[in-house]
Image: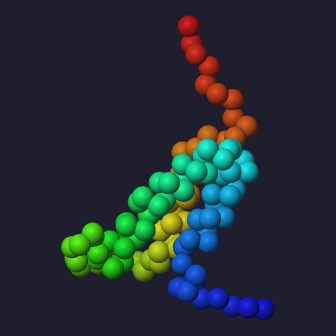
Amino acid sequence: MVYVDPKNLGYRPFFERWVRDKEEKYSEVMAESLNELYTKYVPICIDRIFDGTSGEDILEPLRFITPRTNLNLVQQLATIIDSMIPAPDANPPQEVD
């Protein structure tokens, strides 16, 4: 058995697996869109929350009521997105005349 500390892995492996799952269930277009949004927003937000860095500005890191990890925040983001995306086998909404 090999133990790897989550601090050393980070959140990227979780996100990559989650996106692969979306690609399998939905389409390659969705996976590409999620990767683009990830690249644009997630690292910047994580840096701001945990390190206090915001571009060139250095601010105080945000405080949590309960301890959180960057992986935990990315998991929560994935769960929120999953709750908003309709199931792949869901019927599209029908137009009402």
Q: Position of residue 23 (x, y in %)?
A: 68, 51
Q: Position of residue 6 (x, y in %)?
A: 57, 83
As drawn, the residue found furthest toward the right would be 1
As drawn, the residue found furthest toward the top would be 97
Instruction: Tally the numbered discs.
Output: 0
Scheme of image coloration: rainbow
**Image quadrant in which you'd find residue 50:** bottom left
In depth, the one of 50 and 79 nearer the eye is 50
In depth, the one of 64 and 28 nearer the eye is 28
Left or right of residue 29: residue 88: right
Q: Residue at x 29, y 75 (%)?
A: 53
**Image quadrant in which you'd find residue 55:** bottom left
On the rendered image, what quadrant is the C terminus found in?
top right
Can residue 65 be seen at all in this image of the molecule? no
Q: Residue at x 60, y 46 (%)?
A: 30
Q: Is residue 52 above or below residue 34?
A: below
Q: Position of residue 59 (x, y in %)?
A: 22, 76
Left or right of residue 40: residue 74: right
Q: Residue at x 32, y 71 (%)?
A: 48
Q: Position of residue 82 (x, y in %)?
A: 58, 51
On the rendered image, what quadrant is the N terminus found in?
bottom right
Q: Residue at x 37, y 66 (%)?
A: 45
Can residue 32 be seen at all in this image of the molecule? yes
Q: Is residue 59 above or below residue 81?
A: below
In depth, the one of 55 and 1 nearer the eye is 55
Q: Is residue 16 above or below residue 37?
A: below
